[in-house]
Image (tube, rainbow, N blue to C red):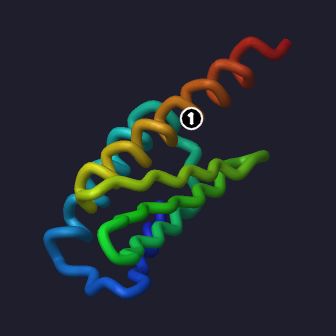
Amino acid sequence: MQVDITGHHVDVTDALKDYVHSKMERVKRHFDQLISVHVVLSVEKLRHQAEATIAVSGANLVAVAEDADMYAAIDAMTDKLDRQAIKIKEKKSNHR
């Protein structure tokens, strides 16, 4: 799994990179067919936004989350991605 992390109006520090990588491991645990992950972290005034696009076999998962804290936005984004990954996994396993 290749994880690309970019920042828009924010410096992406090693702490943020490590945090995103640790959160993406949770998504990878539920759905192991991840091809690539692209995460964009942005800041506009007091609004911190985390956006992720995950390419999986047969689909793309997209999640956007906003919060007053960057770490909380990353948490909310990974929760959304986790739910989407579980839903796609269940669809593929229920198919004949």
Toward the left, the furthest residue is 15
Tell me if residue 60 comes above or below residue 80 in the rendering: below
Above or below residue 96? Residue 13 is below
- Identify the residue at horizontal 73%, vertical 24% (top origin): 92
Image location (x, y in percent) of residue 93: 69, 18
Q: Mark 1: give few (<14), some (14-19) or many (20+) Cα within 10 Å.
A: many
Residue 13 lies left or right of residue 42; in this view the side is left
> Badge 1 is on which residue?
85
The residue under the point 30% across, 59% down is: 20
Answer left or right for 92 relative to 72: right
Q: In terms of depth relative to the viewer, which is nearer, 38 or 65?
A: 65
> Which quadrant of the figure has residue 50?
bottom left
Identity of the residue furthest to the front in this view: 45
Q: Residue at left 42%, top 41%? A: 27
Q: Amino acid at mark 1?
A: Ala
Which secondary structure, mark 1?
Answer: helix
Whole-percent x and y of residue 35? 59, 58
